[in-house]
Image: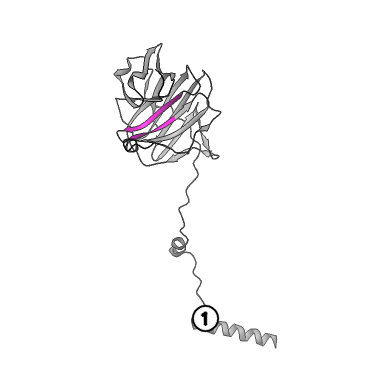
Amino acid sequence: MKSRTVLILLLGAVAAASCGTLPNIGIGGPKIESDLALQEIKPEPTEATLPTGAFFRDELEEEINKNWGMKVVSGLESQLMWDQFNGKFRMQTLPPNDTNFIFLNKANTYQDVIVQAEVENNGPTGNAFSLICRATPAGWYEFRISSDGYYELLRFDQYKKDQGQNAYTNFQLKRYNSTKIKGGLDKNIFAISCVGDLISAFINGEQLYWNKRPLAIEDKTFSEGAIGLLGYGASLDVNYNWVEAIKP
């Protein structure tokens, strides 16, 4: 009796399927992708190392105006004092305002480039050094470190500044501390890499990590421009010993 019941149920299921009363089960296809809003699976950023081939290297021994021009971002030009001695370019500022002076290389513009420099602090540990890539009248990318151990990876938008807004976008939302930065009066070598749509940063030859992954920010705002260096702070006293543009 049980076998006959099972046979009747199976025959009924086959008949129902032939009449279209059972749903068809689809496998794969674009419908799942669109219905579930599936995204492309992107690889995790991998740790990078700095290449050694340079577009150019400036030991900053020649008169600074030969290869570099200045732009005042904030503060007063009269607040800035600078000089060159023993192959170092020294920047000092007078109080009371925060200042932001950039020096852009006049020789070339680059799409893909790594900008690296050696710096040392002569004054307060809150002094900040910055390197810049892809600078244009519209803005630039900037990597800033301070001798008290903090860093920021930033984008400067001139349009925002013209509108009276904060021109800086911090890609990580705030300053972060790194033990890779040597404090006090020690020298640091730091670099910003602008390659394709990825902006990344290095301190003393090592790529920074953020959220347990190599720091690599994707941004398409600026694609080409000049390179530069920057001094920032209310009582700045810093040296740039050399700066170079490296081929990625």
Q: Residue furthest top?
A: 86
* Callout 1 crowding tier (Cα within 10 Å): few <14, some 14–19, many ≥20: few
Q: 204 or 231, which lies in front? A: 231
Q: Is residue 85 above or below residue 148?
A: above
Image quadrant containing the N terminus: bottom right
Residues rendered magenta in the picture: 128-143
Q: 14 or 193, which lies in front? A: 193
Locate residue 116: give its quadrant.
Answer: top left
Q: Is residue 136 part of the magenta span, yes or no? A: yes
Q: Label 1, on which residue?
A: 17
Q: 31 or 14, which lies in front? A: 31
Q: Position of residue 123 (x, y in %)?
A: 48, 17
Q: Position of residue 177 (x, y in %)?
A: 54, 31
Q: Position of residue 71 (x, y in %)?
A: 32, 25
Q: Residue furthest front?
A: 96
Q: Which structural element holds mark 1?
A: helix
Q: Position of residue 248 (x, y in %)?
A: 40, 33
- Residue kind at label 1, given as amino acid type: Ala
Q: Is residue 233 part of the magenta span, yes or no? A: no
Q: Is residue 2 above or below residue 82?
A: below
> Is residue 3 shown left or right of residue 183?
right
Q: Considering the whole magenta stretch, tell me its main secondary structure.
A: strand
